Amino acid sequence: MKQALVALAVPLLLAASLYASTSPDTADAFAGDVRLHLTHVDAGKQMSRRELIRRAMQRSKARAAALSVARSGSGRVPGKSAQQGEQHQQPGVPVRPSGDLEYLIDLAIGTPPQPVSALLDTGSDLIWTQCAPCASCLAQPDPLFAPAASSSYVPMRCSGQLCNDILHHSCQRPDTCTYRYNYGDGTTTLGVYATERFTFASSSGEKLSVPLGFGCGTMNVGSLNNGSGIVGFGRDPLSLVSQLSIRRFSYCLTPYTSTRKSTLMFGSLSDGVFEGDDAATGQVQTTRLLQSRQNPTFYYVPFTGVTVGTRRLRIPLSAFALRPDGSGGVIVDSGTALTLFPAAVLTEVLRAFRAQLRLPFTSSSSPDDGVCFATPMAAGGRRASAATVVSVPRMAFHFQGADLELPRRNYVLDDPRRGSLCILLADSGDSGATIGNFVQQDMRVLYDLEAETLSFAPAQC
């Protein structure tokens, strides 16, 4: 444990040195492993499983469109006209996916601490919140962060390393770094880039504090989906992962209807992450993490195929390949609910389900229900009872060196009273694929950024 404390203390002090004279005092910067609770954006809304999943599917469609923009770098937001706030970027200028995210982290910013509920995003890098006074701000559950009320708030100088890591930054104010950061759904934040003390309340009750660079947004458009900011967990320098030189991070996501809290852990993390609380209930599997020079934020994995029932589908490896121009590839993403496949792959998977289920597609399902099959009628033409469960072929995802066997609940939505059964997959809208958070529920997932591996195992989160 002492070694773990020293291991994380060193990168935290290095991170603090980036700010030089503009940083707050770092004497009490935290060290060691951190365990936080995550809250789903729809928690406490007293909705049925079907309603919760339908809402997540709607967000997944927006996220798919935004990921497509981010991967292509085109900067054009599908389905938004100029009047609706379309963001035009120069060719090759990257944008990040979207504010339509799924999980919230409770933290506090400043001295004294001001509470903020921020969205966790493994698909972007910037840490930011909305600040007062605000020229244009989005709806959020918390009061706006007030820099004037914090003794540790310091605008970053233009010479600061993190300022130069922001693609769109300027120094129009005397020696003050200002920024603009764009997301693929059209959400944009502009403001002052500053350093401030962030406080995390560990699930053990300990309060842990560290200085970080962050965006203090005073002109923001788009959506924050019940959050008050975003914490980027991507791989670029602006993210929490990079600023703290985090070696490993791990999460365990509970089902949407569960009363149990999801958890996020980060730090040096020993191999015991799969033991103790949220202990693995099955074999730990490990595959490689891949990187793209064109899209360095994302966590790519070597995905090799899909099995439906007992049949490994004949899908060429090229369908999942990460190409030199940054297109294609398969990412693991906490901010997308559904797993997204390119159209040709999705068609092949659904064809296999239809052949083995021997059921027709429904003709009257809502677009928000995804791809659904009509289930058999009970005697007398009545719909089957709620207790009736149709047998569904197993589904497994294959990676280099690892196989992910999916529990039925992680890819099927039953609605016996409506006479339908839906497969929780969707079209990615481009040549890339995304492993969403729904298939990761009740699973401990570990990102090892030193070994460049991704490990996972079933767990009771």
Image (spheres, grey):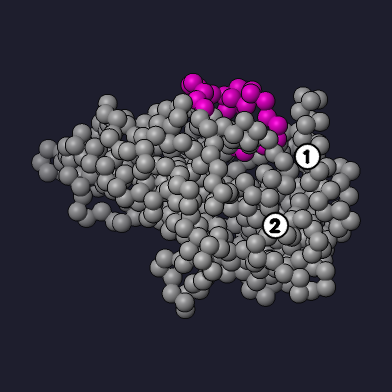
Which kind of residue does numbered mark 2 sit on?
Asp
- Label number found at residue 11: 1
Whether the magenta-drawn stretch holds residue 270 is answered as: yes
Residue 41 lies, in percent from the top left, at: 53, 51
| Residue 389 appearing in the image | no
Residue extending furthest left? 380
Image-based side of 354 in relation to 340, left or right: left
Q: Which segment is the magenta one?
A: 263-286
Which kind of residue does numbered mark 1 sit on?
Pro
Image-based side of 268 in relation to 17, left or right: left
The residue sitting at 67% across, 44% down in the picture is 241
Closer to the camera in the image, 45 or 94: 94
First along the sequence among labels 1 and 2: 1
- Label number found at residue 184: none
Residue 285 lies, in percent from the top left, at: 50, 25
Q: In this view, does 369 lie above or below 306?
A: below
Mark 2 Cα-neighbour bin, 10 Å: few <14, some 14–19, many ≥20: few
Q: Does dot 1 land on a helix, a strand or a loop?
A: helix
| Residue 280 appearing in the image | yes
Whether the magenta-drawn stretch holds residue 385 is answered as: no
Image-based side of 427 in relation to 192, left or right: left
Residue extending furthest front? 324
- Picture quadrant of residue 176: bottom right
The residue sitting at 49% across, 21% down in the picture is 283
- Label number found at residue 165: 2
